[in-house]
Each structure stands twice: as structure tokens, then as C-alpha cells.
Image (cartoon, helix red, strand yellow):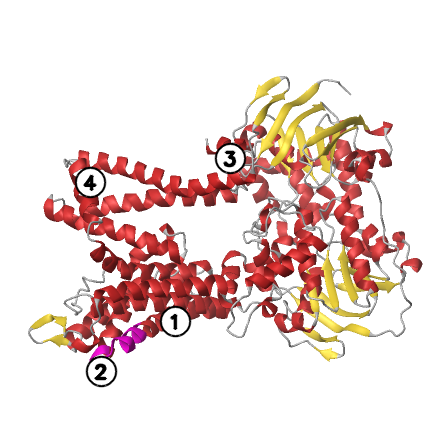
Amino acid sequence: MRKIFLEEAGSLYQRRALRYLLVFLEPMTAFAIATLINALILYLLGYDPLEVYSVMFLTGYSDIHYLFIKSSPYIATGLAFSTPFLAGIFNIGGEGQLYLGALTALLASYVSRNFLISILTGFIAGALLSGLTAFLRVYRNVNEVVTAIMLNWIMYYITSYIITVYIYDPFAPYQSRPVPREAVINPDLMFIISVFTALIIYIVLFYTSIGYMMRVVGRSFRSAVYSGINIKRIMILSMMIGGGSAGLGGALIPLGTSPHVLDNTMSALYGVGFMGIGIGLLGRNNPIGIIIASIFISGLIIGGQNVERIIGAPPEVVDVIIGITIVMLAIPYILRNILAKRGVYI
Amino acid sequence: MSRRPIIQMIGIEKIYPDGQYALRGVDFEVFEGEIHGILGENGAGKTTLMRILYGEIRPTRGRIFVRGREVRFSGPWDAIREGIGMVYQHFSLIPSFTVRENLYLSMLSMNKKIRREDVDEIAREYGEMIGFKISLDEVVEDLPIGVQQKIEILKTLMRGARILILDEPTSVLSPLETVELFKILRRLKESGYTIIYITHKLREIKGLTDRVTIMRRGRVVSVVETDKVSEEELAKMMIGSEEFVFKRSEVKREEKTEKRRILEIRGVSVVDDKGVEKVREVYLEIFNGEILGLAGVQGNGQKELAEAIAGIKKVSRGRIFFNGLDITDLDVRERYRLGISYVPDSRGEALIYNMNLAENFILTSLERYMNSLKIIDWRRVRKDLLKAVERFDIKTRSLDLDVRFLSGGNQQKLIIAREFSRDPKLLIVSEPTHGLDIMSTIYVRDLLRKFRDSGRGVLLISSDLDEIYELSDRIAVINRGRIVITGDPKELPPEKIGYYIGI
């Protein structure tokens, strides 16, 4: 049907207007389909879909303040996936980079009592960790996905170990000592820092030579070789920007959200890095899109928590609903890629 | 020859979703047992029409009849069941498999019960029919391109094809291999097969086909019996008589005052990724104000030699001097900066298809468009690009269009525009007019001549002998990585060059 639309639209401008319209229509349709599927699942599980939805959407997006705070680390981990992705390298290690960023920021805050130094430490630690993954891929041909998954677990246990053995709070030994008061930041600042990072990465990607080279490497390896781009350096660099961003996201959580500690199961961090993959794809690997996707998904997560609390649905049900929504929203993007491989561009 | 149409396509239209017309209502008919040519320039719609017949893409409108019965193909497998087979320009064989494994695999996709032992018998049967013998234990990648193509034909026949579609089959072949291919096709015709032959080469149409359908811009211009028309008439129909103005620039060349050596290659060898020596001890010189034509069949080391000069491939032995400076150890960017420019044979290498014109325009000259903070000055890029688009007559709706939407000719013009605006001193250009229509070809060749006449050097790599003769001041022939002869075109007639290409 869409094909006929485009054919019959006479002028270029009409066609262009339709294409912009599609940008909105497409996710709307996908979202509507996801809602229908979710309603069916909820009904089969014995919940009233309307009730669940009203709680989810009315409460999820009602507190703008909380919504923005919640979305801040997701913006960072979304960037952590998408920046290297544009240069043709997968960063599945956002989770581990997030842990390391949070841990090192926490340690730095004890010493420096300054939030800027702490955040910077988190950024650098994340960048170095992802840089290791990229280095092994580029110079030793070790698959970056395998390395990243292993490092995720290594980071999980290292962080947990350091919290329980070295920096535990004597009054609550399952968690760390809190961030010194001087280094604590206003939750609103979390969002500002995340958005600022996204904007910087946007400028790097589209307005600097390094970003240009990253996109060339990601889109056509052969052209990158032909034009003499130092592919190895560019891949490592893109991965380090991504890892740094995840580390920054990790740093923001203990610094900005109360009770300003890390517990030994990392409950405040767990899954935020992985969610970045979905958010990156949902935001079409564009920093601005990632900001929007993060806010949208955060609303679903907040709403989902309220569904658990008010209606009593188990968290797994809420996860299924969020998962189906993300998959549905990603389908037009995937379809487009499949069609492009067959030589049809929409 | 029976006059019964075996294939009829009626009112075929194909419009791509982005609004581009590929076919605008084409009627096409092939008789059983004939060799039917489809002649047209690139972008005329020849390949699109045949991909529709083969079920690869679906027409927007139109009907297809095979043996008088209407068919609707949902994919190539349906076409294969109707006895239609396609021999691709780029072969679909698995390089690391043996011939037998490849044939077995392709038969298996049509008939799950086939046994490996049956393959030998069937292959021998069809091989005899077309006069082609091959040991089935050979590994495909070790075989010459011409042989691979024959295997591809054999494969198609073994799947039961009675109607063969060949898409520009000679573009990768040497003159001798082309002769052999034509022999096979004639034998197939004698055995009652129907052949559809796509090409833009007039000589092949005249030499091979019974009838020819001429296409231009998505329409059928004319259907004629081949022996009733001359090559000139075919050419006029193909490009449209109103466009048939051969303008060749008659730039007076000033006699070179002093012969200066721009490039000197001293005993260079290049080894490819698999450890095979592709270029063997090549000595070559290029002077200012000359085009050196490097002739040879594709795959004889031309690409590796060009990449060695551009710095993309490392040399295993020898040195390269550019204006007297030893550049052997410099990287690609440094060499580009010194004034070397390289236009590879594959446009997918020189262009990033899913980036726009502006982004492609700075690929090899990034340094010129960034400030000290490494920020790209897109406004200046666009200004220069706009000038280049006008000067080189690149047809595009916008500078923000992805280059995959440009026609092949305009893509090639964009590459040349980009490289020329860098003002290089040496241009290495490989198959510059491959796949271009006649007007673009004339234009590109003119540009190369003007470039030469401004006192700079060109290394022209081409497998098209006509092109080599039209442009070159000196000719060198490369064969299996060695330069086998160099000399003046006047003293080297085509027969002699052909001999050196083929030995």
C-alpha cells in the first residue's frame, strides 16, 4: 500500500512529505500492533489489559522529573552501543563498562570528593575496558562479542568483590559506603550530563573528520581501505567513546540517585547496559533518537513497576510487555534492511 | 526455426518504490530455438526485464507467458521449474568447493533425491553436448574464469533449463574465451535450446544472434532480424539517433618540451592475501603528458599493481618512485597528498553507496575540508561539490541523495570529479568506462585526454582493447603479473597485443 502511495504522489515534494509522515506513522503502527499483542497476552494470563495499560501509561509518563532521571543512564548505554555500531563493531560489553564506571567513580569520589573527577574517572575506566575488547578484536582477531560477554561477568564479580571486601558499609555490609556529600549531584544534573554527552557524540559523528571516518568504516570497509583510513585506530577509538559513555552512565547512578551507594548485587545497575542495545537500535543509532528512545523506554519501565505494585503482576510479565514493544518497534527498521539487501529502498 | 513464441512478456512495467521507472511497458517475445539478443545501454532495463523473467523481482504490471501458458513466479525456483535458467555475470559457484560439489549442491536444491554418484553421469552427458570436458575433482577457485563460466552454464543445463539467459557474459572473458563461449552457445542452439543474450556490444549481437530486441530507457525501441541490419543502424537505435553525435575533442597537444618521469616502478612484486604472487618484478615508467595503457584480461595483476602504487597493498619486493621521491614506505593518505590519485575498477570501492554525494565527495580529500579542530566545513564541501556537479554534468536531484540512487554513469562522473578536483599529478584509472553508456564514455575519455594534455600522467588500466588504442600514447601488456611487452601503439597492432594478452 505504501508503494502505491509513493508512486501516485506526483511531485518530489509530495513524496518527501509522505516519507516524513512515514517516519511517524511507522512507529505508531508498530506500537499499535505491540499493544494488541500485549493485550492478548495479558488477557490470556488473566489480567485486565485496559487496567494494566491505564496504570502503565498514565503513571509511567506522569512524573516528568522522575522520567528524565530514570532515562539518563539509558541514554549513556544507548550511546555505548550505537557509537561503535556505526563504525562496524559490536559493543555488547556496555553492562561491564557500566559496572566498572560506577565502581571507579565511587572509589574516586571517596578520594577526590568531587563529582567531576568521579565522572571523568568512570568515563576513562569504561573507555579503557572497551578499548581492551577492541584491541583484542583488531590486533588479535578475537571476536568482540565473546570478549565483551566474558568481561561483563568478570566486571560483575570484581565489583561485587570490592564492595563486600574493601568498601563495605559497617552498618549495612551488603552495600558500599555512600558517596561523600560533596560529590553528590542533583538528579537533574544526571539528565543534563547525559544529553550533553549525546549532543557531543552527535557533533563528533556528523561534523568531525573522526566521526566521518567512523561512519565510512562502518558502512564500507573497502572504501575505508581505499581512502587510506587507519581502520584499526578508528575502530578502537569508536569503541572507546562507546565504553566511556557506558562508564559515564555507571558513574551517574551512585552519584545522582539516592541512597548513593552500590550494593553487592548491583541491583541499581543490573540490565541497564543490556537495555542500551535495544535503545540504540530503537533510536536508529542516532544520538538524538537515543535520547527519545530512552525517555520512551524509561516510561514503560516506570509504568511497569507501578503495574507490579498496584495490580500485582509479576515483574516477568512486565518484562514481556516491554520486550514485545521493543521488538515490534524494531521490525520496520529490520524490514527496511532486508529490503535494502534485495535492492529495494524505501 | 519454429516461429512459435516460447516466451511472451506483455506490458511489463517496473517502478521502484522510490519512484524510479525501470521499465515502462515492455512487450518481449522469444521464439523457441533461437538466440535472441537484448541490446541496450546500461540502465536501459535489459537486466531488470530478465530478472523479472527469472522470477527474481516482480513486475509492477504486466503478464508473462511461457509456452503459451500464463505464469506467475514467486521466485527463481518457479522459473527454473519452467525450464528457465540464468547464467550470472558474477558467478554463483562456491570457490572452495570442487566442481562436483558445486554441481551436486545446485541439483540438490531442485531434487532432494539426487545422489552424489548421479552427478558424474549427468555432467558427462551435458558436457558432451556442449563439447566441454572437465575433471569434477578440480577446486573451482583454481580454475580460470572462462572455465568457471562453462561450469556455470553446465550447472544451469543440469537443472533442466531449456531457456538460458546470459547477462553480459563476455565482460570477464579474454578474446579467445569469448570465441569458445560462442561455440558452446551455437551448439546449444543446434540441440534445440533457446538462448537470451544480454549485451551492449554490437559486435557480439551481429556475430551471434538471430534476432535482437533493442531497448532504450525502459522501452523496447525495435525488434529486428540481426542479418538485416548493420552495426551502425543498431548503434543508432540503441542510443537514439538524435544523440548520435560523436564529438571527440581535438585538443592540439603541445610537443612535450621535456620528458619528465612522474612514476617509476623498479622491480615490484606484490603478494596477495593467500600468498600468491600476483605482480612479478614489474618495471614501468610513466612520463608527464602521456597516457600509458595497461592492457590485459582482468585478474592478471592489474589491480594489485594499481593498489601497490596507491599504497593500499604493500610490495614484497622492489621500489616505487614518484617524481624522484621514494614512496615505497609511505601510506595511502601520504601518497594521495603528494598528488597520486586512484580510481579503482569497482565503484563500490571508490564510493560508499549509502552515503550522500557530499559525504562521498570528501572521501579522499578529507584534510582539505577540515579546520584545526578537525571539524568538517560542510558548507565549503557543498560549494565545491556544486561546482563539480555543474562542471562534470552530474545528474542528481540533490546533494543529499545517497549515491546508490545515481546511475552508473553519474556515479563514475562523481568519482572522477572528486579525484580531478584534488588536482593530482598522476592518475591511476582502472576500467574507467566499464558499464557506462556511450555519451558518458565519450565524456570520460575526453576528460582523460585533457588531463594528459595538461602535462600530467595517466596509468590507464583497461581490458577493453578499443579503449586502450583510443587513448594510449604507449601500451604495456600485463599477463600473469608480468609486463610482457611495452611499446608504441603504432608499432603494436591489435593482433600482436591480442597474442601477448593470450599467451
Q: CA distance from mark 3 to mark 4?
A: 35 Å
**Numbered badge on residue A53:** 4
Asked if badge 1 and badge 2 are on a common chain, one would say yes
Could you tell me if the residues under marks 1 and 2 are in contact, i.e. CB atoms within 8 Å?
no
Q: Compared to B309, does B35 lie above or below?
A: above
The residue indicated by pointer 2 is: A111
Alpha carbons under labels 4 and 1: distance apart: 44 Å
Q: Nearer the viewer, mark 2 or mark 3?
A: 3
Identify the residue under disc 1: A132
Q: Quadrant of the C terminus of chain B?
A: bottom right
Q: Earlier in the sequence, mark 3 or mark 4?
A: 3
Q: Which residue is mark 3?
A: A6
> Mark 4: which secondary structure?
helix
Chain of the residue where label 4 is placed in the rendered structure:
A
Q: Which residues are magenta?
A: A109-122
- Quarter of the picture containing the N terminus of chain B is top right
Which chain's residue wears label 1? Answer: A
The earlier-in-sequence mark between 4 and 1 is 4
Q: Amino acid at mark 1?
A: Leu
Same subunit, labels 4 and 1: the answer reads yes
Indicate whether residue A32 is drawn in magenta. no
- How far, Cα to Cα, is label 2 from label 4? 46 Å
> What amino acid is found at the position of numbered circle 2 in the picture?
Val
Circle nearer the N terminus (1, 2): 2
Q: Residue furthest right?
A: B491
Answer whether residue A120 is magenta in the image.
yes
Mark 2 — on which chain does it sit?
A: A
| Quadrant of the rendered image containing residue B252 | bottom right
The CA distance from mark 2 to mark 3 is 61 Å
Question: x, y percentage for residue B34?
Answer: 75, 26
Q: Residues within 10 Å of mark 4 (few under 14, many from 20)?
A: some
Magenta part, dominant SS? helix
